[in-house]
Amino acid sequence: MSDGSVNQGRILRNLMRLMDATCGHSLYEVLPRGVQVWLPEQGLGVYPDLLVVAGEPLLHDGQDNRVLNPCVMFEILSEPTPGYSPDAATLPERGGMFNLCRTIPYLQAYLFVHQTEARVEQFYRAEEHLWGMTTQSGLDSVVELAITDVRLPMMDIYARVDFSLVV
């Protein structure tokens, strides 16, 4: 998580609204930036911009700031995001935080949301140790998540985002 830009704040606000409207009356709970996802195998925590848990949050050692069971995580990319390269040929090179988090057994989807263009890259768990990827580009596209048939229109994710702003 980096210091936020105006566009990053707008995208985060938009994602919170969309996800909360979709998940608000289901078993899924949307939690904003600042909630730590604890990675016991690595002995460290990471801070996604937005996360979704199914059911009650599982807490590491009862600490209410260390969630163990995210099923969806969002990272709003700032320039540069450490460890992320959109041109990388292999998955481990694509994202440092995602590379750590994909071992979380509850995690079903990890989304990179760009703020310099309307583009969302979604990594999804196809099988236990196999991840697939989809990319949505352009304001007319829709990002679809497997949980509760979530559909996130790109025009809503990027509402009020000014791509001419310097990141």
Image (spheres, helix red, strand yellow):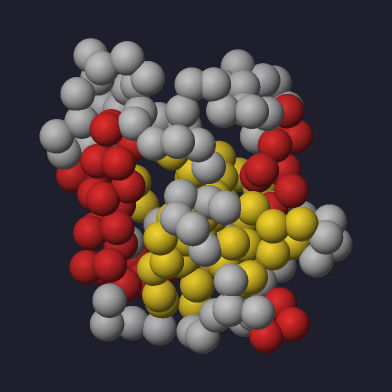
Foreground: 1 or 87?
1
Residue at the limit of the structure toward the front, as seen here? 3
- Residue 149 placement, left or right of 106: left
Q: Is residue 31 above or below residue 47?
A: below
Foreground: 62 or 71?
62
The answer to whether residue 153 is seen in the rendering is no
In percent of the image, x 32 and y 14: which residue is there? 166
In percent of the image, x 36 and y 52: which residue is there? 144
Question: Residue 129: x, y in percent?
Answer: 76, 55
- Residue 30 placement, left or right of 73: left
Q: Is residue 69 above or below residue 138?
A: below
Total of numbered circles in the picture?
Answer: 0
- Residue 4 placement, left or right of 80: left
Q: Is residue 15 above or below residue 84?
A: below
Question: Residue 36: x, y in percent?
Answer: 59, 62
In percent of the image, x 52 and y 63: which residue is there? 35
Question: Residue 46: x, y in percent?
Answer: 64, 53
In percent of the image, x 33 and y 82: which residue is there? 26
Quadrant containing the C terminus is top left
The quarter holding residue 90 reads: top right
Q: Is residue 132 above or below residue 53?
A: above
- Residue 12 placement, left or right of 37: left
Foreground: 100 or 66?
66
Question: Residue 42: x, y in percent?
Answer: 84, 56
The answer to whether residue 59 is seen in the rendering is yes
The quarter holding residue 38 reads: bottom right
